[in-house]
Image: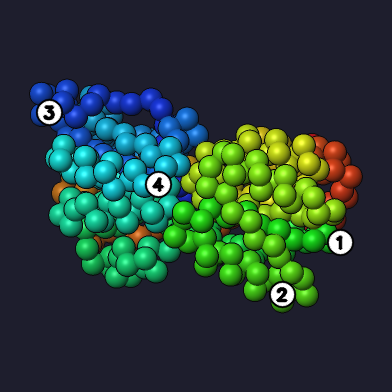
């Protein structure tokens, strides 16, 4: 059931619009879409991005998008970004974490870049400030990584007697900071937290098998484009090993995950589309402040809670924005 409607922000898809070569023949602008994740997982977010473009007058007939997917192989991002620059795209969308935005920044200081990331763009030197970006970069940020402490708090409410663990992707530049924040939050509640790493499908399997060796443990999934792209795998493993798990995006809850807390990525990608369209119309990135989420979603899956033998506190249910029964 839907309790409150929240605003949020993030994006990608396998479907493509006309490629750059075709676009140049008809003299329509080409947007480069650089993403660290996989096309299939980002399909709804690409759709939201296109909706944003349409909001400012750009559709398939008067703009083209060329996609560059890293598919979780982050070392491919620099060459993918350089290729988009060589194709003379007029705007680059950098999606799926600061690692994609940093690759785009390294590739060009002149082509406008619109980021759609969960990280703090100031921390990584992408912009001077959120209100005054001061460079060729602007966009939207979800700040999903700084919600780690809140997710741990929610997890301990639903599994109060469990030990705590966390899985992060060591190839994500934000993983160390997020892990430290999680450990500090756990210590404040008088608990210890184990941090495990996974940077591919096989390592995700191994991390869950490792966690399952410890009885009565609850897990938080680090914010990472690879994990976003592996929603079904993560939810299936949590169910197989009966591990109460909290995630950073509502899609996990809809897929059968126990609980999720974070911003709505689709709105972020719609806003990124609006910004890209405004830049095509002549706006400068320096005049477009980085957008932030103002509200967040809490999704609880009661079916999964019952399967795990957990009773969700009524106080937590009252705060939920969506309860899946």
Q: Where's residue 258, x and y in %?
A: 74, 45
Residue under the image location 19 percent in, 29 percent down: 20
Q: Where's residue 10, x and y in %?
A: 45, 47
Q: Residues within 10 Å of mark 3 (few under 14, many from 20)?
A: some
Q: Disc 4 on helix, strand or loop? A: helix
Q: Is residue 108 above or below residue 22?
A: below
- First in residue order: circle 2 vs circle 4: 4
For the N terminus, give its image quadrant. Answer: top right
- First in residue order: circle 1 vs circle 4: 4
Cα–Cα span, label 3 and label 1: 61 Å
Q: Nearer the viewer, mark 4 or mark 3?
A: 4
Return the residue at label 2. Answer: 187
Report whether 166 appears left or right of 177.
Answer: right
Image disc number at residue 24: 3
- First in residue order: circle 3 vs circle 1: 3
Q: Are marks 1 and 4 in contact (CB under 8 Å)?
A: no
Q: Disc 1 on helix, strand or loop? A: loop
- First in residue order: circle 2 vs circle 3: 3
Q: Can residue 46 be seen in this view?
A: yes
Q: Which of marks 1 and 4 is in front?
A: 4
Cα–Cα span, label 2 and label 4: 32 Å
Q: Disc 3 on helix, strand or loop? A: helix
Residue under the image location 52 percent in, 67 percent down: 177
Return the residue at label 4. Answer: 74
Image disc number at residue 204: none
Q: Do the residues labelled 2 and 3 touch (CB within 8 Å)?
A: no
């Amino acid at each position: 059931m839907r309790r409150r409607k929240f605003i949020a922000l993030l994006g990608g898809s396998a479907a493509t619009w006309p490629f750059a070569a075709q676009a140049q023949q008809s003299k329509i602008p080409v947007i480069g879409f650089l993403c660290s994740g996989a096309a299939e997982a980002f399909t709804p977010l690409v759709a939201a991005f296109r909706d944003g473009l349409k909001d400012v007058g750009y559709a398939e007939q008067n703009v083209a998008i060329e996609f560059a997917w890293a598919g979780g192989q982050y070392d491919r991002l620099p060459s993918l970004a350089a290729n988009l620059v060589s194709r003379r795209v007029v705007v680059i969308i950098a999606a799926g974490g600061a690692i994609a935005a940093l690759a785009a920044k390294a590739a060009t200081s002149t082509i406008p870049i619109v980021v759609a990331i969960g990280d703090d763009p100031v921390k990584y030197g992408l912009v001077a400030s959120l209100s005054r970006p001061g460079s060729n970069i602007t966009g939207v940020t979800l700040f999903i990584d700084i919600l780690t402490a809140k997710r741990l708090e929610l997890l301990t409410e639903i599994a109060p007697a469990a030990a705590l663990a966390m899985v992060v992707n060591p190839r994500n530049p934000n993983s160390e900071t997020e892990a430290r924040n999680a450990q500090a939050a756990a210590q404040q509640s008088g608990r210890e937290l184990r941090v495990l790493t996974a940077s591919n499908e096989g390592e995700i399997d191994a991390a869950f098998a490792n966690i399952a060796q410890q009885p009565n443990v609850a897990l938080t999934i680090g914010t990472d484009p690879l994990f976003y792209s592996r929603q079904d795998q993560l939810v299936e493993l949590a169910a197989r090993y009966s591990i109460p798990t909290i995630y950073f995006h509502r899609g996990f809850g809809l897929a059968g995950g126990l609980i999720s807390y974070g911003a709505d990525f689709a709105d972020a990608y719609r806003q990124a589309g609006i910004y890209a369209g405004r830049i095509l119309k002549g706006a400068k990135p320096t005049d477009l402040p980085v957008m932030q989420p103002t509200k967040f979603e809490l999704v609880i899956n009661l079916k999964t809670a019952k399967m795990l033998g957990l009773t969700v506190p009524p106080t937590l249910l009252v705060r939920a924005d969506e309860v899946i029964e």
